[in-house]
Image (cartoon, rainbow, N blue to C red):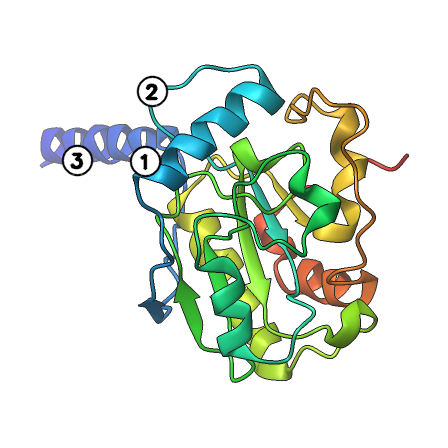
Amino acid sequence: MRRFFLFFLMLFSLIACATEALPQRTITIYPIQIIDKPINFGAERIAMTKQYIKQHYGMIVKNIKITPKIIVLHWTADMSFDKSFKRLQPQKLFTDRKDIAKASLLNVSAQFLVARDGTIYRLMPENWMARHVIGLNYSSIGVENVGGEGNKKDDLTHAQRASNIKLIRYLKAKYPSIQYLIGHHEYKQMESTSLWLEKDKGYRTTKADPGAKFMAEMREATKDLHLKMPPKK
């Protein structure tokens, strides 16, 4: 009986030690509904994207796949979902975008578009490069929100706010490589990081979206993910 007791005690100690040696990790995948609504991303747009990467980032690539490290939140400055989608849909830039046309005729794009009612639409493969933020396209996933009327104020809805939180959590769970959460208006603060690639020092635009209040809310709601803010200038 004594031998059995000693054997049981030793076995219990070994199990306890083994349990302590294992890393304690809890991974939660957040449920989310995403509707695929592809923009036109054919051979011409892929070729133009490769050329953009070569011209602005100094890299020659075989494909346009990226390793996501940043989530960039935007607004469309238009209150219509249809108009916002049609802006992103063509392969080439609209003629009224003279502010960025000199840099490339590649149309702007984003991986996601969030409607006013909070519906999340995926416009293109998540790990393909979109043109949505100067200097950071090659490492970022862009999320456009329908709103920001006149590009002047944060009028994004409660439903959009809730959907952005879900989307941030979904993306971080799916891509552990993601390190940063930034607003489009904060993009120039990333110039001091290793993720900044833009070679044209004159290619910059000033952005207001999606605003300090919206970003503060997103960061507070996802602070457990420990996503970094852009460095302060």
Q: Secondary structure at mark 1?
A: helix
Mark 3 vs 1, N-terminal side: 3
Total number of numbered discs in the rendering: 3
**Residue at (74% x, 42% y) in the render:** 187
203 to 61, vertically: above or below: below
Residue 16 in view, yes or no = yes
Q: Secondary structure at mark 2?
A: loop
Task: Say which amino acid is labelled 1.
Answer: Thr
Q: Position of residue 11 (x, y in %)?
A: 19, 31
Q: How many C-alpha atoms fall within 10 Å of the one at disc 2: few (<14), some, or many (≥20)?
A: few
In what quadrant of the picture does the C terminus appear?
top right
**Residue at (43% x, 49% y) in the render:** 91
- List the residue tagged with mark 3: 8
> Between residues 154 and 109, which one lies in front from this camera angle?
109
Mark 3 vs 2, N-terminal side: 3
> Between residues 65 and 158, which one lies in front from this camera angle?
65
Q: Position of residue 152 (x, y in %)?
A: 83, 70
Q: CA gap, disc 3 to disc 1?
A: 17 Å
Task: Say which amino acid is labelled 3.
Answer: Phe
Task: Say which amino acid is labelled 2.
Answer: Lys
Mark drawn on residue 61: none
Q: Nearer the viewer, mark 1 or mark 2?
A: 2
Q: Is residue 195 left or right of residue 214?
A: left
Q: Secondary structure at mark 3?
A: helix
- List the residue tagged with mark 1: 19
The residue positioned farthest toward the right in the image shown: 233
Instruction: State which quadrant residue 4 falls in.
Output: top left
91 to 53, vertically: above or below: below
- List the residue tagged with mark 2: 62
Q: How many C-alpha atoms fall within 10 Å of the one at disc 1: few (<14), some, or many (≥20)?
A: few
Asked if labels 1 and 3 touch by Cβ distance under 8 angstroms, the answer is no
Q: Nearer the viewer, mark 3 or mark 2?
A: 2
